[in-house]
Amino acid sequence: MSRFNFADRLLTQTKKRGNPLCLGLDPHVSLLPQFVMGKTDEKTNRVKSIEAFIISYIDLIADKVPAVKTQAAFFEQYGSAGMQMLFDVSSYAQEKGLLVILDAKRSDIGSTAKAYAEAYLSKQAPFDAITLNPYLGMDSLVPFIDACQSNGKGVFVLAKTSNPGAKDYQDLVLQEGGHLYEAIAKSLQSHSKALVGKSGWSSLGVVVGATYPEEAVKIRQLLPKAVFLVPGFGAQGASAEQALTAFEKTETAYVGGVISSSRAIMFPTSPECDCFAEWETGVKTALAAALQTLVV
Amino acid sequence: MSRFNFADRLLTQTKKRGNPLCLGLDPHVSLLPQFVMGKTDEKTNRVKSIEAFIISYIDLIADKVPAVKTQAAFFEQYGSAGMQMLFDVSSYAQEKGLLVILDAKRSDIGSTAKAYAEAYLSKQAPFDAITLNPYLGMDSLVPFIDACQSNGKGVFVLAKTSNPGAKDYQDLVLQEGGHLYEAIAKSLQSHSKALVGKSGWSSLGVVVGATYPEEAVKIRQLLPKAVFLVPGFGAQGASAEQALTAFEKTETAYVGGVISSSRAIMFPTSPECDCFAEWETGVKTALAAALQTLVV
């Protein structure tokens, strides 16, 4: 049964790779190197070049980390061709043994939420988990949670995000006590328990920015077994120590979620870089440096 | 300048059509009639049949209402072919003189939000406005607001949604007083003013469910000139009177936003219906009945 639970698969993979790093596969238009963007001027060709670049990146990192994260926006930007690329690179990453988290932050209700769950958490969809925005309420999350149950997938619900604006609403203090992000974490407790796998970890996870370690401690107390997706490490300035606040140290790896890093490792060279080998060396160096801070 | 402001265009169009009805273009798999779904068994063919069906629907309604709403989930469900269909039917609706609101409830930060804004609110994108989820904070909304300024587009930020789960978080009472949805409405005030057009209405709008008329009154007080997108009329049980709570009566039409209705008008017959003419008559009857309740 273990392979049908996302949290179990994540734990196995994390211990196998010895680290909880999750690398973003984000084709930022303004960061893509010259050797990818320079030779193309037509949209479809450009998408093909970008896809080839992402595939090269996956090949470089596949045996080093447990998971990757595809940011939907950077694919949707290229319309239907981009959407095809999202599915293609995600499939490829899975074939290479990586878990794939779709960072789509979807939010909708009833039959619409079901349609999203069908699109991204069906058995055949090349994603192991998806990020969700909870603002619409529990009935916007349940269709995805149901899909996790049926298809062995996972969700990461936004609790406390890594951006400065996270304080605008997430930190509002409630009359009943605590902050909004704590109320959301609390409301997930029973559902989180229902998605606990053999490993003891739950496939109902939360997003908690590395930039807010104190909040991470509070959320970990409320959801002791939820897997955390922790953005903000690297480019956004949080240290490995901050990012690992809510993780558990085991003999082989820090476990309890994934630490996500995108730009710093995928784009170690400037957009002017016209040399694949230079970029490749940059990735290896940046990845080795990041991993060094995240191993036990 | 007027044509470059979404709220101005919406007002003009609403007065021209004499009503504020916005019809959903949502290819619900389980509701599509037999004459669409029956003849196809392969995915691409099916998308072609669905697209032809939506085009027929647009032809039926284009001179009756000011706007349509495309629900992204129902297109994303069909992968890249569905994404192409979303752009194609939205373009077609615009050619027919309709304003197109993309109901995508997107939410992300910084360069990611910019990528979404580029995908859906660029000058060439076939959408006049998009729905947004505010949970991530103001820095998740600003890239879209900037695109509204530059490209004459609009946004509808979720405030109080029409679903039962809306109470889970949106209704939480804050220590500073008021509910979360009110704090969000308040925080939008200055940005809303910045997007006011010649008509006096603002292209920074909010989503306020027809099922919550008392909350609509409170939000209207906080954002007197924001255009409202009001779901929940029809299939979700709210009356026209409830839906129109925050609208202004003018000589020609109720103005101040759009009342959205999807299933009740697009799917007046059962999924077993195998007769195009029967469906066509059903749409005309349902639309006429809805319009009767929404005219001055």
Image: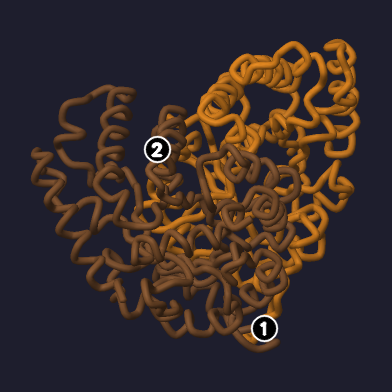
Chain colours: A brown, B orange
Q: Nearer the viewer, residue A126 or A19?
A: A19
SS at circle 2: helix
Q: Quick check: B216 above or below A269?
A: below
Q: Position of residue B39 (x, y in %)?
A: 75, 11
The residue that disc 1 covers is B177
Q: CA distance from mark 2 to mark 1?
A: 51 Å
Q: Residue at x 74, y 30 (%)?
A: B29
Q: Nearer the viewer, residue B156 or A262?
A: A262
Residue at mark 1: chain = B
* Camera sees residue A278: yes
* Camera sees residue A76: no
The residue that disc 2 covers is A92
Q: Residue at x 80, y 49 (%)?
A: B244
A65 left or right, relative to B211: left
Quarter location, residue B189: bottom right
Question: Which disc is residue A24 wearing?
Answer: none
Q: Quadrant of the C terminus of chain A?
A: bottom left
Q: Quadrant of the N terminus of chain A?
A: bottom right
Q: Residue at x 80, y 60 (%)?
A: B164
Q: Position of residue B188 (x, y in %)?
A: 54, 64
Quarter location, residue B261: top right
Q: Residue at x 86, y 45 (%)?
A: B240
Residue at mark 2: chain = A
Circle 2: residue type: Tyr
SS at circle 1: loop
Q: Nearer the viewer, residue B165 or A175?
A: B165
Instruction: From the image, state whether disc 2 or disc 1 is nearer to you.
Output: 2
Q: Within 10 Å of the Cα at label 2, are there few (<14), some (14-19), or many (20+) other Cα atoms?
A: some
Q: Position of residue A203 (x, y in %)?
A: 59, 62
Q: Within 10 Å of the Cα at label 1, are there few (<14), some (14-19), or many (20+) other Cα atoms?
A: few
